Amino acid sequence: MTTESDYAHNFSFNESISFVIDCETQDEIDYYWNKLTEGGSESMCGWLKDKFGISWQVVPTVLGKLMSDPLRSQRVVQAFLKMKKFDIEKLLQA
């Protein structure tokens, strides 16, 4: 992917640098996901690239709690590996 700029530069963006947006609600996830993928592209597990090629992770805050539960963590991982945009309800059901 080529990023355009009015200024000369000898770099391009990649996943080694990304921004994380922690979201409390599904509405927040949907809002940021829709705004940032406009002209960009979706990836897996909450990752996306905006129209400038910058990587973002849009993550529900509840994910940390779910992942720290040894009885649920594997089911949660299996659930989110199938997702592009996180779905909080499906994670809670896992």
Image (cartoon, helix red, strand yellow):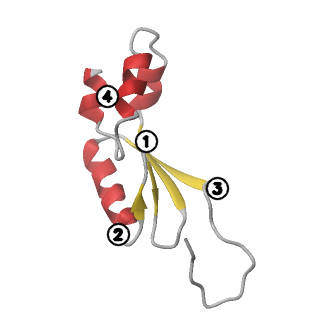
Q: Position of residue 5 (x, y in %)?
A: 60, 85
> Marks 3 and 2, how far apart in space?
20 Å
Q: Mark 3: which amino acid?
A: Ile
Q: Nearer the viewer, mark 4 or mark 1?
A: 1
22 displayed left or right of 14: left
Q: Residue at x 43, y 52 (%)?
A: 43
Q: What residue is pinned by disc 1?
A: 45
> Marks 4 and 2, how far apart in space?
25 Å
Give the mark nearest the N terminus, 3 or 2.
Answer: 3
Q: Position of residue 12 (x, y in %)?
A: 66, 71
Give the mark nearest the N terminus, 2 or 1.
Answer: 2
The dot on residue 8 is none
30 displayed left or right of 59: left
> Marks 2 and 1, how far apart in space?
18 Å
Give the mark nearest the N terminus, 1 or 3.
Answer: 3
> Marks 4 and 1, how far apart in space?
12 Å
Q: What residue is pinned by disc 3?
A: 17
The image quarter containing residue 91 is top left
Q: Residue at x 66, y 53 (%)?
A: 16
Q: Does the CB distance between marks 3 and 4 fall below 8 Å?
A: no
> Marks 3 and 4, how far apart in space?
26 Å
In the displayed structure, 47 sits above or below 4; it is above
In the displayed structure, 23 sits above or below 55; it is above
